[in-house]
Image (cartoon, rainbow, N blue to C red):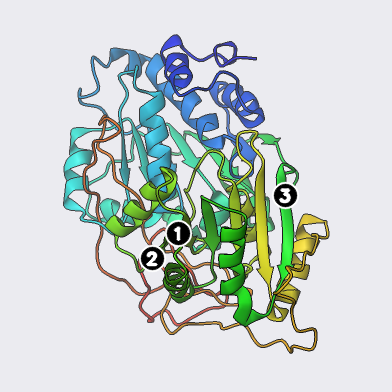
Amino acid sequence: MSFSTLGLSDAIVRAVTEQGYTSPTPIQAQAIPAVLNGGDLLAGAQTGTGKTAGFTLPILQLLSNDKVGTALKNKTAPRAIRALVLTPTRELAAQVEESVRVYGKYTNLNSAVIFGGVGINPQIKLLKQGVDILVATPGRLLDHAGQRTVDLSNIEILILDEADRMLDMGFIHDIKKVLALLPPKRQNLLFSATFSDEIKALADRLLNNPQSIEVARRNSTVEVIAQKIHPVDRDKKHPMLSHLIKENDWHQVLVFTRTKHGANKLVEQLGKDGIGAMAIHGNKSQSARTKALSEFKDGSLQVLVATDIAARGIDIDQLPHVVNYDLPNVPEDYVHRIGRTGRAGATGEAVSLVCVDEHQMLKDIERLIKQTLPRHVIPGFEPDLNAKAQPIQLRSGAPGHANRGGRPGGNRGGNSQPRSAGAGAGGGRPAGGNGGRPANANGGNRNGNGGGGRGPRPASRPGNRDS
């Protein structure tokens, strides 16, 4: 099967081929015809399966070949927003918009991305110029709607990407507000890695007689990923990680920590061991996050330390190693984390450093993925079998840190380089942001990137708008 047999135009297939792709992935083979058919779609796909192209390619096809699209003379001609993609984080928003731009380079369609954490005025100017496909995080989109700087009255297609993550981050109220601004007659596409009861409820409310496709077992982990557990005492985690990196000569390692403070501390410790590392999380500036991601992707940075939400949107082909320095509070996040490796047919390795405090978390993860992960004790790092478990540190004093058993709280934007409508890959315009707002009562702060507990917290407590 080829992309051209799926009903895509020569212009789109040409752009896809230039990126080195010749055959569609399973999610693309099913989703592209379904979207082209014009109906609603509920799609289940793990990260790394090619789902972004699964909806960007058919959207480009539909919009470029209809009466409005064929009337466009070039990418700068006036136009209204006809497709809206909502994503939970900045990195993911920028990644999706980049895909739209790359795959649509030979069409007359253009696109833009808007998210919080950066100035809003350049975004207003960008929206005035007119775009066909808008990628946005919910909070910043509502900021524009409140200022009447975005017109959503012509939306023909709505896409909720990583819908499970958006619900986890407390965006359900923002999503409902966005839906109220859209024309009732439209095509709706919902993509989710997992199908929780909340996702099913949202799908029932949003979708009209949808086609349903799922290319991976519910909450499954990718078979090409070698998973292992290294039991270790809590105070030996950092020495063990340095040992593994040096002993195995790892050159590109994505490491997950539970908190932002933990990420910073680990980077400092690795640096003292002569291992180059940088951290990405909500307390880092946009430029620092972009720099760290860029250097990690091009291989000049050996270790990238990330919190769960900040890592959403990291898309690196053939990433060889993912390390869970801390196990995640939410078992489903384990699946998201290790899905960063083992992509595009490549093999990958996911290693978890587990101390006595995390044994219950490990049981929850193994119950979710329906398998017992192999344990490997590293000589010289044998754990104390008589060690007593201690409560997991729930908060580090700053809003946005994760609680045990908690869901990440949302922030109001997302995170990565903004792109101008119709700009080339290097052309970026600043995108918008504004100051902190009170966090919502369910624990989410509203900016596309955040951590927080599942339990309620006071509505008056200020939310960290970039965690």
Q: Nearer the viewer, mark 1 or mark 3?
A: 3
Q: Which residue is mark 1?
A: 310
Q: Is residue 30 above or below residue 264?
A: above
| Residue type at the position of mark 2 | Gly
Residue 257 in picture, x, y percent from top left: 54, 68
Which class describes the residues within 10 Å of circle 2: few (<14), some (14-19), or many (20+)? Answer: many
Say whether disc 2 or disc 1 marks the residue closer to the N-terminus: 2
Q: Which residue is mark 2?
A: 282
Q: Secondary structure at mark 2?
A: loop
Instruction: Give the label, 2 or 3, closer to the camera.
Output: 3
Quarter placement of the C terminus: bottom left
| Badge 3: residue crowd in 10 Å (few <14, some 14–19, many ≥20) | some
| The image quarter in which residue 45 lies | top right
Cα distance between the residues tagged 2 and 3: 30 Å
Label 1 sits on a secondary structure element that is: loop
Observer-nearest of 232 and 308: 232
Residue 185 at x, y percent in the picture: 47, 34
Element type at mark 3: strand
Picture quarter containing residue 356?
Answer: bottom right
Mark closest to the chain's N terminus, 2 or 3: 3
The label shown at residue 226 is 3
Q: CA distance from mark 2 to mark 1?
A: 7 Å
Q: Amino acid at mark 1?
A: Ala
Most foreground residue, 183 or 431:
431
On screen, residue 455 versus residue 450, left or right, reads right
Q: Categorize mark 1 by other alpha carbons within 10 Å: few (<14), some (14-19), many (20+).
A: many
State whether residue 181 appears in this view.
no
5 lies above or below 411: above
Q: Are marks 2 and 1 in contact (CB under 8 Å)?
A: yes
Amino acid type, callout 3: Ala
Q: Residue at x 50, y 82 (%)?
A: 395
